[in-house]
Image: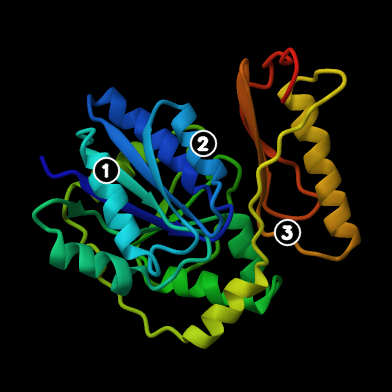
Amino acid sequence: MRPIIVPLGGFLGAGKTTLILAAARELQRRGLRAAAILNDQGLDLVDTRLVAAHGIDTDQVAGGCFCCRFSDLVSAAFRLREHAPHVIFAEAVGSCTDISATTLQPLKLSYAGEFRVAPYSVLVDPERAQAFAAGDGRPDWFFLFRNQIDEADLICFTKADRNSQFPALRGAPLRYLSAVTGQGVSEWLDEILGGEVPAGGRILDVDYERYTRAEAALAWLNCRAVVRLETPLSPALVVGPLLEGLDAALSAAALEIAHLKIMDDTPSGYLKAAITGNREEPSVQGMLDASRPPFTN
């Protein structure tokens, strides 16, 4: 069996991991197995732990984009292939661009006997897109966003359950999805798995000097900490105040948040909270009612 690799892109906080979880549930209903490769600039990936917590076979490409670590992506895909998945989602880091030339074309050319490749879906947060359309946001961020849109085979607006206004984006066909309600997810899977939309049909001419500056401007930080509390607390009572405090400190220092996410693992469950902008209401996944652990978080 040749699993199909489903590449996903989109700016930070667009909802890529959340869509993977929703799509994996839909595939399971169809009797199909899903796996996922997560990608980030750091080495300890919150999203890898989140997807694995849902019982999905996972692997990761850390320390750089798919375009810079193509051999790592291929190795991860072969490792997951041993679990006999029908679909392998490949989620690119939120700053990644030039995926078609550096990743999709080599996969189609050199590994056609082992994998099929689905069209490249770029996910778009409608609120972020509206801000960019209005001229708000940093130029470096817009540069990355615009390149991602330009090379998409499909442009998928996410969070359609929360938004009714979608800016006009020129390029690939537009789709409207909600991983929360399931709106459009089944139809999107049918389309990308059906083979009618070509994969990697748009090749960019990327200004790599500007691309490097734009990635550096995001000031990535990934870390893991062990928190030892004198009085044990539930994950919600650790993650909530920590996220709120970090948001307040960064906002007070006039540092713009692109994507800030925290995941707390305990024996009783996990909780992930994330924001995609300063002073934003967090999105939460996991067990809000997970009990406090006996000694540590």
Q: Nearer the viewer, residue 131 or 104?
A: 104
Q: Amino acid at mark 3?
A: Ile
Q: Is residue 220 above or below residue 38?
A: below
- The vertical placement of 213 against 102, above or below, is below
Q: Nearer the viewer, residue 152 or 55?
A: 55
Q: Name the residue: 27% across, 48% down.
A: 77
Q: Earlier in the sequence, mark 1 or mark 2?
A: 2
Foreground mark, 3 or 2?
2
In the picture, residue 237 is in which quadrant?
top right
Mark 2, residues whose alpha carbon is within 10 Å: few (<14), some, or many (≥20)? some
Q: Residue at the spot x=34%, y=57% of the render?
A: 72
Q: Secondary structure at mark 2?
A: helix
List the residue tagged with mark 1: 79
Q: Residues within 10 Å of mark 1 (few under 14, many from 20)?
A: some
**Secondary structure of residue under mark 1:** helix
Residue 218 picture location, percent across and down: 65, 67
Q: How is the image coloured?
A: rainbow
Quarter occupied by the C terminus:
top right
Assign a secondary structure to mark 3: loop
The nearer-to-camera label among 1 and 2 is 1
Which residue is denoted by mark 2 in the rendering? 49
Residue 244 visible within the image? yes
Q: Quadrant of residue 29?
A: top left
Q: Is residue 183 among the parts visible in the rendering? A: no
Q: CA distance from mark 1 to mark 3?
A: 34 Å
Question: How far apart, in angstroms, are the residues tagged by discs 1 and 2?
Answer: 17 Å
Q: Position of residue 124 (x, y in %)?
A: 51, 57
| Residue that numbered label 3 is attached to | 257
Please state which of the two labelled residues, at mark 1 or mark 3, is closer to the viewer.
Answer: 1
Task: Give percent across and percent down for residue 153.
Answer: 32, 64
Pointer 3 or 2: first along the chain = 2
Residue 266, image x, y percentages: 64, 22
